[in-house]
Image (cartoon, grey):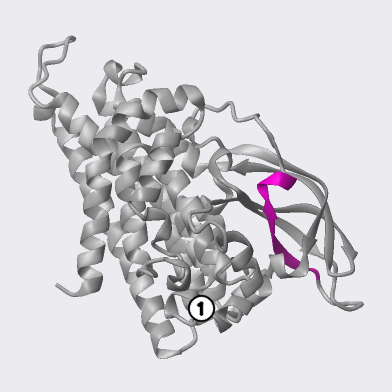
Amino acid sequence: MSTAATQAATLLEAARALAPRLVARADAAEEARSVPAETIAELIDARFFDILKPARFGGLECHPGVFFDVVAEVASACPSTGWVLGVVAAHAWQLALFPEAAQTDVWGADRSALICSSYMPVGKLTPEPGGFRVSGRWGFSSGCDHCSWAMLGAMAPPAREGAPPDMLTLLVPRSDLTIDDDWFVAGLRATGSKSVVLDGAFVPTHRTHRMSDAFRLDSPGNAVNPAPLYRLPFGQVFTRTVATPAIGMLQGALDAFVAANRGRASRADGKLPESDPAAQEAVANAKLALCEVRAVLHHDFDEMMGLAERGEPISLASRVGYRHHSASVTDRMVAAVDALFVEAGSGAIFRSSRLQRFFQDVHAARAHHANNPRRAARNLGSTSFGHPTNDYFL
């Protein structure tokens, strides 16, 4: 095996080895509404947060397919942990696109520093010499309890009169933030996706990243992180972080369904659910859905990485297609989990059932703005007829 293949196999095996402990902690994590600190420590020790981090700061710079396989594997044991891992670890990839000074601010003193986010562009900016004065409230900041930095969205004032505004990602230290514990939800409870608040904090220019630079694949960090990994479109990497955990959720639901129903007789009629054609079809269709979405995931990133390695552009038409692929994942996974849940019978509604957790969590994942397949489908259909894209988060 090549070094890269060996590394990928090692990371995936570490994720599988961690699974029993994640399952054992799942109930406590939901009650605490946060991934346990010991789990975060184990994810750090396993180097999962380093998979997309630049090598110059101790990262592994792996192929993104490796990262998303690990995320799905973790999510199959604990959906909330997989979600937090996917979102938080991807921020190391984006930090590599910031100016070098910002990367040093975060990793210069602590290479294991973690970053949370909320990209909704609600920040209020006031330009000042050397940066911006920023206030705002951002929701859904997954894993924020465990992070020492945050990436927050805002619209920058136009660079010149008549020019359009540009979306910024602002990098701010935890010391500038207030966390509002408002995460009381039915699904993905343990992600701790609370709101964060800034009140007049100063953000220097070097701690900002323009989405227009990310779209053009020409960010300041590319000067010091030239690897093809950092020539991928931001919109393609980020959207997959909130779609791929659903793959693990279906895998976990399928495993839980089979384990719970192998040899079990129904209390209603004494029949074996495993012999029920509807249950058999639900299992088969879930397996097919998993094969299909995993194949598309790897196809898309293999294609993008190949173009990046050759220094070739990633066309807008291709990006629109990839975006639709990503947005469609959770719908496919929700349908398959729902079919398993229906065939599981009344036992699945109890909180002691692992299946109900996957049911709740995959529906919560589907609610994310980036996981709306209809908007992405309409854009793909429209551009196929020659109309301009209405989505630039590509």
Q: Is residue 311 above or below residue 289?
A: below
As for residue 172 lying within the magenta part, the answer is yes
x and y, in percent, of residue 374 in the image: 53, 54
x and y, in percent, of residue 87 in the image: 50, 51
Specify whether 72 is left or right of 134: left
As for residue 325 lying within the magenta part, the answer is no
Viewer can see residue 311: yes
Instruction: Identify which residue, 312 or 56, lies in the foreground.
Output: 56
Write the start and end of the magenta stretch as one range. 165-176
Taking the view exactly as shown, the residue that stands out farthest to the front is 109
Residue shown at the point (42%, 71%) measured from the top left: 55
- Amino acid type assigned to the residue bearing label 1 in the image: Asn
Specify whether 381 is left or right of 209: left
x and y, in percent, of residue 151 in the image: 64, 55
Question: Quarter holding the C terminus?
Answer: bottom right
Instruction: Identify which residue, 113 or 382, lies in the foreground.
Output: 113
Circle 1 packing at 10 Å, graded few (<14), some (14-19), many (20+), is many
Mark 1 residue element: loop
In this figure, which residue is indicated by the disc labeled 1? 225
x and y, in percent, of residue 30 in the image: 45, 26
Q: Is residue 84 above or below residue 202?
A: above
Viewer can see residue 387: no
Instruction: Identify which residue, 371 or 62, lies in the foreground.
Output: 62
